[in-house]
Image (spheres, grey):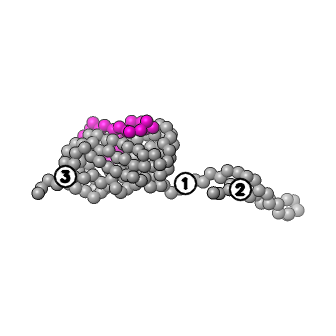
Amino acid sequence: MTTPVSISVVTDTSNTMVISTHATTLIPSTTVAGTLTAVSLSQVSNVANEVTTYTFAFTLANKIPINGWIVIENTPGLTFAFDGTIGCGVASGSLNACTFNSVNAVEVQVNTEIAKLVSVTIIIGNYTNPPIPTSASFTVKTYSDSAKTYLVDSIAAGLVPTLECDYP
């Protein structure tokens, strides 16, 4: 435990150094994002090129404040195509509806603070599976601000879609 203390060094007109201490609360800033844990990706269908529903689940390392964002991105090697009727739902009362910003990401705005260590599940429907198996993972990032400037947590591994074998 750290005891908050502020130390002031002041010199008076006779150049005598005076040191005084004052109790204060220091608020450290987080400059390094945390890592999402307990990540998983499941699909309703594992058939190549088939439209299906994806379920992303993860646990937050840090809280996401009101107006923060959760962004699920395709990474190079994941060239899925949305079919134009993307559906997105969340298994938490703290999230607004999902929005589709491009072929690269699905974004979810947080409308009430989500505490750290909370499990989040996001379901994305009408998503087309890749045509061939891949080892590329989706990336999930959380941000503390509406401009998506300040990264809170992220994960860039462990969210790889699986496909059925189509030959003996």
Q: Which of marks 2 and 1 is nearer the N terminus?
A: 2
**Please, what is the dominant secondary structure of the magenta stretch?**
strand
Specify the amino acid type for callout 1: Thr
Q: Which of 146/157 is in front?
A: 157
> Is mark 3 in CB contact (under 8 Å) with mark 1?
no
Element under disc 1: loop
Specify the amino acid type for callout 3: Glu
Q: Earlier in the sequence, mark 3 or mark 1?
A: 1
What residue does disc 2 label?
5
- Determine which quarter of the picture holds residue 126: top left
Element under disc 3: loop
Q: Earlier in the sequence, mark 2 or mark 3?
A: 2
Q: Which residue lies furthest to the right in this view?
A: 14
- At a point 21% along the width and 52% down the height, the residue shown is 163
Q: In this view, does 160 lie to the left or right of 148?
A: left
- At a point 14% along the width and 53% down the height, the residue shown is 166
Residue range of the region highlighted in magenta in the rendering = 82-106
Q: How far apart are marks 2 and 3 (CA)?
A: 60 Å
In the rendered view, tell whether residue 133 sits above or below residue 147.
Answer: below
Within 10 angstroms of label 2, few (less than 14), some, or many (20 or more) residues?
Answer: few
Q: Which of 124/100 is in front?
A: 124
Is residue 100 magenta-colored?
yes
Which of the image's four quarters has the C terminus? bottom left
Element under disc 2: loop
What residue does disc 1 label?
30
What residue does disc 3 label?
164
